[in-house]
Image (cartoon, helix red, strand yellow):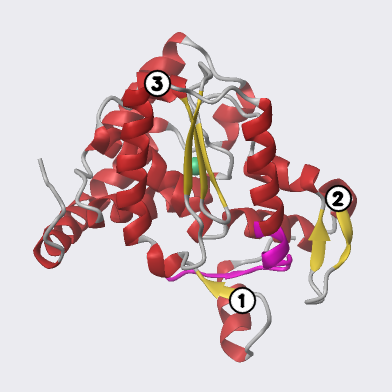
Amino acid sequence: MKMQPRFVAALCATALLAGCYEVPVTGRHAVNLVDEKDVTKMSIGMFDDMKGRYRISRDPAQNAQLQRVGNRLAKVVFWDMPDAEWEFVVFDNPQVNAFAMAGGKVGVFSGLFKIARDDDELASVIAHEIAHVTAKHVHEKLSQELAVNTVGTVGMLGVGLSGAPLITSQALSAAYGLGTTVGGLAFDRKKEKEADYIGLMYMARAGFDPQAAIKVIEALEQLSASEPAPPAFLSTHPSHPERILQLMDAMPKALAERERSSQTTAPIIVR
Ligand SMILES: [Zn+2]
């Protein structure tokens, strides 16, 4: 069983059903069955844990770049994540990967700087990862697993105070896709494409050049040609041309968005 979009929309329209939410930017209706506060708390704990387990980069240029780019993006997503306590950390690791978690925790592996070569390109990756968070893709993924009755494999701890199921940190970590290798793609094609779209609008609003999103995917494509990705990666994620086409489609809107934001917020620097 899969929750059909029309069914979800009807469900959310007929009742003020607990757990219904609207995805920012796209306005899509989705259902969340897990305890949101708990997911945030656990995510922050997992991030702290990673900071203890992985070496944190002391590279001044990479750290400064991530703070600069991250802070600009955090400003434009304020209303989508008002409670976030943002933290941007570079991990000293050759993996080409980045992730963002509920609560405003963002990690970048230093290998990412191989394909994200300037602020605009780095912004496109971070904005994509933040979009997964504001769209609550992790919550939705766990909710979908709960809905198809794979509770055993999800790993449920019980029922929280809100009445929503509590999820184990193991299930949460799997939902984040932590441990996947190339490019930080952890979700199904639909969610990846949604994060591409939302991320594109976020980076444009922050005054970055949205065209950089395409350059990054092209660089990722070149990289995966030289380092073949595992089959699971290929079967569940949109192909690079498919992602590029969608981004090209959305580009006029993104450029208009950037134009608008540069008129209303003076300090944004556009190259
Ligand atoms: Zn993604």
Which sits earlier in the primary sequence, circle 2 or circle 1? 1
Which residue is painted at 68% across and 66% down in the image? 37
Q: Taking the image as drawn, is residue 26 in sight? A: no
Q: Which mark is residue 20?
A: 1
Q: Taking the image as drawn, is residue 268 in sight? A: yes
In the foreground, 198 or 95: 95
Say whether marks 3 and 1 touch (CB < 8 Å): no
Q: Is residue 92 above or below residue 2?
A: above
Residue 10 position in % (x across, y down): 58, 82
Residue 34 painted magenta: yes
* Three-letter amino acid code of the residue under disc 1: Cys
Q: Secondary structure at mark 1?
A: strand
Part of the protein shown in magenta = 26-40
Camera-nearest label, 3 or 1: 3
For label 1, count other residues whose C-alpha is less than 10 Å away and answer few (under 14), some (14-19) or many (20+).
Answer: some
Q: Is residue 243 above or below residue 86?
A: above
For label 2, count other residues whose C-alpha is less than 10 Å away and answer few (under 14), some (14-19) or many (20+).
Answer: some
For label 3, count other residues whose C-alpha is less than 10 Å away and answer few (under 14), some (14-19) or many (20+).
Answer: few
The quarter in which the C terminus is drawn is top left
Which sits earlier in the primary sequence, circle 3 or circle 2? 3
- Residue denoted by label 2: 155
Which sits earlier in the primary sequence, circle 3 or circle 1? 1
Q: Is residue 46 left or right of residue 214?
A: right
Which residue is painted at 33% across and 46% down in the image? 246
Q: Is residue 140 above or below residue 114?
A: below
User: Which quadrant would residue 59 be assigned to in this image?
Assistant: top left
Which residue is painted at 42% across and 25% down in the image? 112
Residue 80 position in % (x across, y down): 44, 66
Q: Which mark is residue 59?
A: 3
Residue 14 position in % (x across, y down): 61, 90
User: Which quadrant would residue 54 be assigned to in this image?
Assistant: top right
Residue 25 painted magenta: no
